[in-house]
Amino acid sequence: MMGLAYILAFFVYVVVVILLARVAARAARRHGRVGWKWGALVALVGYLLVFWDHVPTLLVHKYQCAQRAHLIIAETPEQWKLRHPDSNIERFILKTSFNGVQFCCG
């Protein structure tokens, strides 16, 4: 039930931002300005009030996954198969080295 309240609040917020953007566009046109630019500016501000951290979060997530998201297990595939007989190790092997095998979940 709480999820429905969040969805309803989100849709109300979107409707309010759209209405404010339309009002800003009309007011800009009345004063001889380009209406869509002012409406887009109001819509952007409405978006950024809620999602100001979304783009930086996506960028940091992509960077962290590329740099640090790995699991290193220093044992051979044969040792892994002995310890985990029901696992499918072939789908986890990324590369081998003289220290053992590096694995990545996924």
Image (spheres, rainbow, N blue to C red):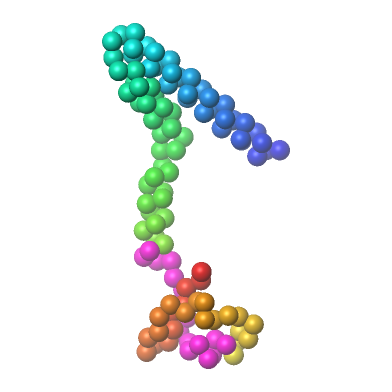
Q: Is residue 45 visible?
A: no
Image spot of residue 7 (x, y percent): 61, 35
Q: Is residue 8 above or below residue 76?
A: above
Q: Where is residue 8 shown, x and y percent of the image?
A: 62, 31
Residue 87 in which image quadrant: bottom right
Could you tell me which residue is drawn at 34 percent across and 18 percent down? 35
Which one is nearer the viewer's eye here, 62 or 23?
Answer: 23
Residue 54 image point, x, y percent:
43, 43
Residue 95 or 83: which is nearer the viewer?
95
Magenta span includes 67 = yes
**Residue 48 in sight from this viewpoint:** yes
Which residue is located at x 37 percent, y 86 percent? 97
Identify the residue at image location x=43%, y=32%: 47
Q: Is residue 93 above or below residue 99?
A: above
| Residue span colored magenta | 66-81
76 in the magenta segment? yes
The residue lying toward the viewer, choosing from 29 and 67, is 29
Q: Residue at x 43, y 77 (%)?
A: 94
